Image: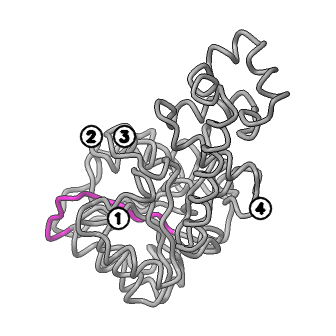
Amino acid sequence: MNQEHVSFLALCDLRGVGFETLKKVCAERVQFSSFFNPQERQRLSSEDTLRSKFSRILEVLSTESARDEALRAGRRKLEYFEQRGINLIFRNDNLYPKRLSDLQDPPHWLFVEGCVDALQSSAVAAIGSRKVTADGKWLATYFGYCLKDLNVVTVSGLAEGIDQIVHRASLAAGLPTIAVLGTGILLNYPKGSEALREEIIEGGGCIVTEYLPKDSFSARSFVRRNRIQAALGHVVFPIEWGIKSGTAHTVKFASEINRPIVYARTPMQPLQDWIPSNLLHNSIRITLPQAHNEFLKFIRDSLSSEPAQKTLF
């Protein structure tokens, strides 16, 4: 077993040690295994700044028996993950999706259940509202009908509404889909999504999260989750959203890292003149189905070109 993986999982289960603390460990370029190594523990304890930041970890692991028990728990969890098909991937691992490096704060680690290779495929991040209108459902379904022609992986958030329509459309087209969670990998959220998760995995896709295995949800965790959705896509398609919606965060993240964005509407929906000018760079605004060819061309071009080389607005 990789000692760094075991040590990380051991730290995940320590009382009073959470996501933010482990992020600080990475920010300080400290190895997780350092907390279990006598010499490294001494170094961490002797430096005032590090001792202050990691006082809780050092306190809980102050005895050899506590460290041994924590490592045993870490090994048991890694064995369980391996049996279930969950990979723990760090930023320096070869399996880590390089597209995430475009973010200002890329995830330091990922938990991935299912086919890790799906993270390296050409992808469209298609996201939208939980409260779906008839027009939104039509656009999501229309996109689904285009998937076989595009032959592309989809990225969405497993939420009820648009996200689940996108995931199911990919499965119906026989293509992998990626669900990015705002919770830990061991939580079944949203409630009732267990069967869809299994279908995603069986269909060659995967479930992805940066949160610790048992982390619950919060408004902030979903906002942070959205940046991963934006970065995993070569192009982003916000299907139904408003400027103050959760999907708007994904759109903003996509714009910041120069991902091409498709803004589509039906003839029954208002013109998209409400979209702020700062979100129109590297984007296209179209009406479907009239602009079907332009829709497919923009996505194909976005999949085959570097975002920085494409400016339609």
Quadrant containing the N terminus is: bottom right
* Quadrant housing residue 277: top left
Q: Say which residue label 4 marks.
A: 94
Mark 1 → mark 2, Cα distance in angstroms:
20 Å
141 left or right, relative to 2: left
Image x and y of residue 170, in percent = 41, 81
Query: On screen, 263 above or below 16?
Result: below
Work out whether mark 3 precedes mark 4 in sequence or the reverse, and give the earlier one: 4
Q: Circle 1 — which element?
A: loop
Work out whether mark 1 precedes mark 2 in sequence or the reverse, and give the earlier one: 1
Q: Circle 4 — which element?
A: loop
Mark 3 → mark 1, Cα distance in angstroms:
27 Å
- Is the Cβ of the residue at disc 3 closer than 8 Å to that at disc 1? no
Mark 3 or mark 1, whichever is nearer to me: 1
Image x and y of residue 185, in percent = 45, 58
Mark 3 or mark 4, whichever is nearer to me: 4
Characterize the local packing of mark 3: few (<14), some (14-19) or many (20 or more) Cα atoms within 10 angstroms: few
Work out whether mark 2 precedes mark 4 in sequence or the reverse, and give the earlier one: 4
- Is the Cβ of the residue at disc 2 closer than 8 Å to that at disc 4? no
Q: Say which residue label 1 marks.
A: 158
* Quadrant housing residue 36: top right
Residue interval drawn in magenta: 124-135
Q: Say which residue label 2 marks.
A: 244
Say which amino acid is labelled 3: Pro
Work out whether mark 3 precedes mark 2 in sequence or the reverse, and give the earlier one: 2
Q: Circle 3 — which element?
A: loop
Q: Say which residue label 3 marks.
A: 276
Work out whether mark 3 precedes mark 1 in sequence or the reverse, and give the earlier one: 1
Say which amino acid is labelled 1: Leu
